[in-house]
Amino acid sequence: MKTLYLDLQNGIAGDMLCAALLDLFENPQDVLHELQHLGLPVSLSLPDTARCGIQGRRFVVKIHGEEENEHNHEHSHAHKHDSHTHSHYHHREEAHVHLHDCSDHTEHDDFTHERHEHAHTHEHKHIHEQAHTHAHVHAHAHEHSHEHTHSHSDMHEIGHIIDSLPLSDRVKADSMAVYRLIADAESLVHGVPVEQIHFHEVGELDAVADIVCACYLLDKLGVERVLASPINTGSGTVQCAHGILPVPAPATLNILKGIPIYAARAQSELCTPTGAALAKHFVQEFCDMPVSVPERIGYGMGKKEFAFANCVRAILSAQPEDSEEIELTCNIDDMSPEHIAFACTRLLEEGASDVYCEALHMKKNRLGTKLSLLCRSNDREKFLQLLFAHTSSIGVREYSIKRHKLHRRSEIIHSSYGPIRCKRSEGYGVARYKPEHDDIAQIARENNTNLHAILHDLSKENTLL
C-alpha cells in the first residue's frame, strides 16, 4: 500500500504542500511543466530553497507578475513593505472576502493577514467588478500611482474556473470539495450564506492554484492512504481589517474542527485556511508516524525563515509486508444473516485482510454471531467506522496479532483450456500452486463438466506444477 505521511509540526499552507508533493517526484520540473499547462491564469515556479540547512523547494504562484503576498490590502492604514507603502481604497456595496494564504510562513515586515472583509457603498452599483487605486510611495523618494481592476468571484464562478480546466473528474471533485470547506468556514464566521461569500481575485487565484495543483499532484502520485501528524497552528495574533484576531484565525479554526491541533514554537500563524482545508479533505488519520518503509521524501518550504525549519515534510512509503496487524471483533445477536453477510462483503471490499464469523451462545440464551476481521493497525479507525456503520454492535474488541505468511504472488498459466489465473505461495520450505476457483468454474461450465474433471486434466498436463 502506498502511504503518504505529512509532517505538519511546523504547520501547513497550500503552497508548502504543493512544493513538498512536487519534491517527491523523480523529475519535479517535468511535473511542474504539466501544472503550468493546465490553463491556470497564474505563473508557477519551483525554486530550490534551503531552511535550517535542509534543501527543499518553494512553490511560487504569481498573479500579474507578483506573488500574492508581495503586497498587503489595507483599508484605513498603510504599512511599509519591501520599501513600498501601499494604500488601497475599496468601494463596494456588498461584503467580500480576501482569501490570502499569507501567514507567517510568508514574509511581512510588520504583520500578516489571513483574509480581509470589506463592506462599502459605491455610487456605481456593480457586483463583480471593483476599482482599486494603489498609491505607491517608494523609499528612493519618487512617487507614482496606478489603477488595477480586480474581480470578485463567488462559489459558482470558482466552480466554473475549475470545471474549465483539463482535469480528471476526481481532481475537479476534490478541488471543489476543498474550496467548499473554506467557503463554509467563511460563511460561518461572517454569518452569511455561502452563496454570498465573494473571494477577492488575487487571493482567489492564489488559492485556486494551490488547491488544484495539490489535488492534481496527490492523484498523480497514486497515494492510497494519507496520514499526518497533529497540526501546529502557531500562536499569537493576526492583524485583519476589523482588528486583531487570535491565531488560529476564526475561519481556519472552523475548518480544523475535529482535527488534533496544538500551538508551539512560533508567535506566528503557521496554518492557513487553504492548508487546513487540504489537510481536512485528504488526511484519513492524524497520528504518529506509523511503521513504514520510506521510499521518497519531499520538503516544501515556506517563504519566511524561523529558528526552526519552516517546511512541510512529505514521506512517501510502502507498507511493510509484515507490518503489525490487529483483530477487531464484535458479538451480534440482533442482525439477520443477510445483513451480516452484507457487512462481511463490505469489509472485504474495503481491504480487510480476512473476515469470518463464528456461532455464539450469548447472554439471555440468545444465539448470536461473532464477527471478526483482520486489518493493518494503521487502518484501525477506518474499520472501526465500518463495523459500527454496518453492524448493530455498540462495542468492538481489539487484539494485537502476528501472522506468519507464505509469500504470495499471482501468475497466469497456459493450459489446453486457455489461460488460467493461479496463486503461488512459497516460504518455510514449501511451495503451493492454486488455480483461481472462478476460472476453473467458468471452464467447467463452458465444457459442461465438473470441477474435479477440470483439475484432473490440468494435473495430467502438469500445468499446476
Image (spheres, rainbow, N blue to C red):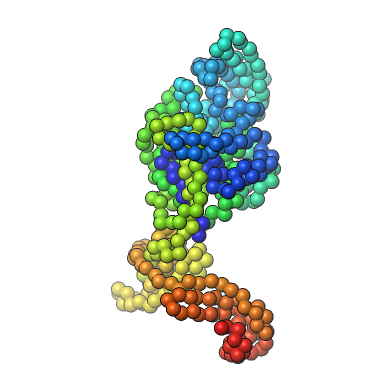
Residue 428 seen by the camera: yes
Give me the residue at 48% from left, 75% from top.
Answer: 426
Q: Residue at x 57, y 83 (%)?
A: 464
Residue 78: percent from the left, percent from the top? 52, 16
- Residue 223 image position (x, y, % from top left): 54, 54
Q: Is residue 222 left or right of residue 126?
A: left
Q: How many marks?
A: 0
**311 or 263, which is in the foreground?**
311
Please give the name of the residue rendered at 40% of the width and 71% of the height, measured from the top-left corner. 404
- Indicate whether 10 appears above or below 409: above
The answer to which image quadrant residue 412 occupies is: bottom right
Q: Residue at x 64, y 90 (%)?
A: 449
Q: Quadrant of the C terminus?
A: bottom right
Would you say residue 97 is visible in this rendering? no
Left or right of 431, for residue 222 = right
**Residue 219 at x, y percent in the picture:** 59, 51
In the rendered image, the vertical position of residue 164 relative to residue 96, given as above or below: below
Q: Looking at the rendering, which quadrant does residue 447 occupy?
A: bottom right
Residue 143: image location, x then y, percent: 61, 10
Give 367 or 408, whichever is nearer the viewer: 408
- Residue farthest along the left direction in this orientation: 363
As drawn, the residue found furthest toward the top would be: 141
